[in-house]
C-alpha cells in the first residue's frame, strides 16, 4: 500500500511539474521517486523480483524528473530586453561578415 501511495504521489508531482513547468515540483517528484526506489530495494527478496525491477524503474523516473526542468522553455514578458546589447552587436557583425563571405561563395563551388 505504501508503494502505491509513493508511486501515485511521485507520478502526480511529475505530471504537474511538466504541465505547469515548475522546477521545484520536478525536484520534489525526484525525491519521492528516490524514496520509492529505496522502499522497493528494501522489500525485495529475490535478486530479480518485481520490487527489484520497480526499484530500477523508479531510479529511471527519478532521472527523468531531475532533468525535465532543462526542457522547460524560458519566456520573457513583453518589453523585456531579450539579449545583451553586446550580444546584439556581435550578432550584427556576424551577419555582416556572412553577407560579405557569401559574395565569394562561387569560388568554393565545384566545377563540372
Image: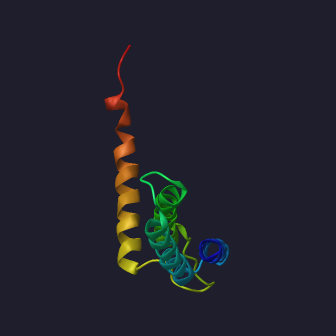
Quick one: which residue is furthest to the front in this view? 45
Q: Along the line of sight, which residue is nearer the eye, 91 or 99?
A: 91
Q: Along the line of sight, which residue is nearer the eye, 95 or 15?
A: 15
Residue 61 position, x and y percent, is: 52, 64
Residue 42 position, x and y percent, is: 44, 70
Residue 35 position, x and y percent, is: 48, 76
Left/right placement of residue 18 relative to residue 31 reads right
Q: Quadrant of residue 108?
A: top left
Q: Is residue 99 above or below residue 38?
A: above
Query: Can you say which quadrant of the picture contains the C terminus?
Result: top left
Q: Along the line of sight, which residue is nearer the eye, 16 or 82?
A: 16
Q: Quadrant of residue 80?
A: bottom right
Q: Residue at x 37, y 36 (%)?
A: 105
Q: How is the image coloured?
A: rainbow
Query: Can you say which quadrant of the picture contains the N terminus?
Result: bottom right
Q: Along the line of sight, which residue is nearer the eye, 81 or 53?
A: 53
Tag count: 0
Quick one: which residue is furthest to the top in this view? 112
Q: Residue at x 51, y 83 (%)?
A: 81
Left/right placement of residue 97 relative to residue 74 reads left
Left/right placement of residue 32 relative to residue 19 reads left
Q: Is residue 85 above or below residue 50?
A: below
Q: Quadrant of residue 10?
A: bottom right
Amino acid at each position: 500500500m505504501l508503494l502505491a501511495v509513493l508511486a501515485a504521489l511521485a507520478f502526480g508531482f511529475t505530471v504537474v511539474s511538466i504541465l505547469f513547468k515548475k522546477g521545484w515540483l520536478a525536484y520534489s517528484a525526484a525525491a519521492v521517486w528516490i524514496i520509492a526506489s529505496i522502499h522497493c530495494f528494501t522489500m525485495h527478496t529475490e535478486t530479480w523480483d518485481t520490487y527489484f525491477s520497480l526499484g530500477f524503474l523508479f531510479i529511471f523516473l527519478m532521472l527523468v524528473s531531475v532533468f525535465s526542468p532543462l526542457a522547460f522553455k524560458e519566456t520573457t514578458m513583453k518589453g523585456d530586453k531579450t539579449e545583451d546589447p553586446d550580444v546584439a552587436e556581435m550578432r550584427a557583425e556576424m551577419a555582416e561578415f556572412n553577407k560579405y563571405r557569401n559574395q565569394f561563395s562561387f569560388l568554393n563551388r565545384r566545377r563540372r
